[in-house]
Image: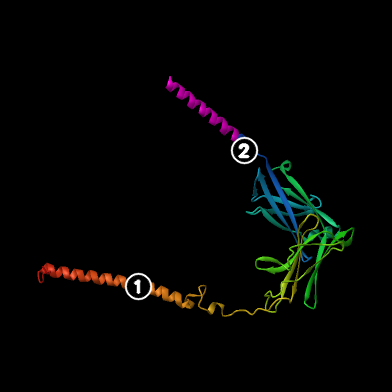
Amino acid sequence: MEKMNIHRFLLLLLALMTTVVTRVAAQKDSVEQKEIVRLHYFNNNNSLQYLLLESILKTGKKSEPQKHKVFKIFLDSDKVENHITKVLTDENGMAKADIPASLKSMWDGASSHTFIVVAEGTSKEEETSSEFTITKSKITIDTSSAEDTKSITVRVMKLNNGEWVPAKDVEIKIGVQRLGGLLPVEDEESYTTDSTGTATAEFKKVGLPGDQQGKLMLTARVEDNDELGNLIIDKSVPWGIATKPDNNFFARRTLWSTRFKTPLWLLFMAYSIGIGVWGTLIYLVGQIIKIKRLGDRFTDGSSRPPM
């Protein structure tokens, strides 16, 4: 009787585990997958313009890039003559596209444009599209020096009905290009344009090393603005300290030099270890030979060990 109860309990436990696994699998399958496509517009120094497409697949709270996904990009409408390019996302779900010269007249003919991104599917019904609108704009940077004060003035303008008007309340980052990124010129990391589309910053990074002529590269950026996209402007200024090239850098005895310029302390350490190891081995071999000779003498009976 007791054995039958155990069997019933095991069957009940197995049925319960099966139910739980089935429900978990059903919940996992019911998690909605959402494809997110972002298009970033870049305008470098009011001349170089390109698009950066970003594709993400979001499953619940988990997001991962969509690799090797094909997209078609159009300007203002998805007609064949408005086709910009076809792109394929990389391992990070990113793809870069340039605006072709064949669409220049269309680009110049309007103050704002809509980019249409079509995710290519196996059939026309499976294709999905997204739209991103950008207003044409430009950014300028100017500098001034008065006594010990150096100032940087950045102005953002946008095209409205064929006229350039100030772009108000635009966030701008102003800094100096360094190897680690953009170094802010003062304590503030970003500035906001006023009613004239202007933002002014004071240069407080005195003593920064520049190139051989002491020049620094100033950069002003508008990042991912909903209306203007990404605007970047650079200007070289002689506000740094001139640096001389170190031609004897690899001629010194350092760890990163060639083997013929190894530091003396490292050579001493390496040779000491080598001499110590080989000296010990030679000493041991000598002792073994000495012991063998003594053994041969005792075997021949020519000498006896002391009693």
Q: In this picture, which residue range is highlighted in magenta?
A: 1-24
Is 16 within the magenta?
A: yes
**Residue shown at 13% from the left, 70% from the top:** 297
Pointer 1: what residue? 276
Indicate the position of residue 63 as horizontal and vertical percent values: 65, 47
Callout 1: helix, strand or loop? helix
Count of numbered badges drawn on the protein: 2
**Does 147 appear above or below 169?**
below
Residue closest to the eye, 225 or 125: 225
- As drawn, is 20 to the left or to the right of 218? left
- As drawn, is 30 to the left or to the right of 72? left
Pointer 2: what residue? 28
Residue most toward the top?
A: 1
Amino acid carrying mark 1 in the image: Gly
Indicate the position of residue 271 as horizontal and vertical percent values: 39, 75
Residue most toward the left?
A: 301
Is 137 within the magenta?
A: no
**What is the quadrant of the N terminus in the image?**
top left
Which of the labelled discs sits on residue 42, or is there none?
A: none
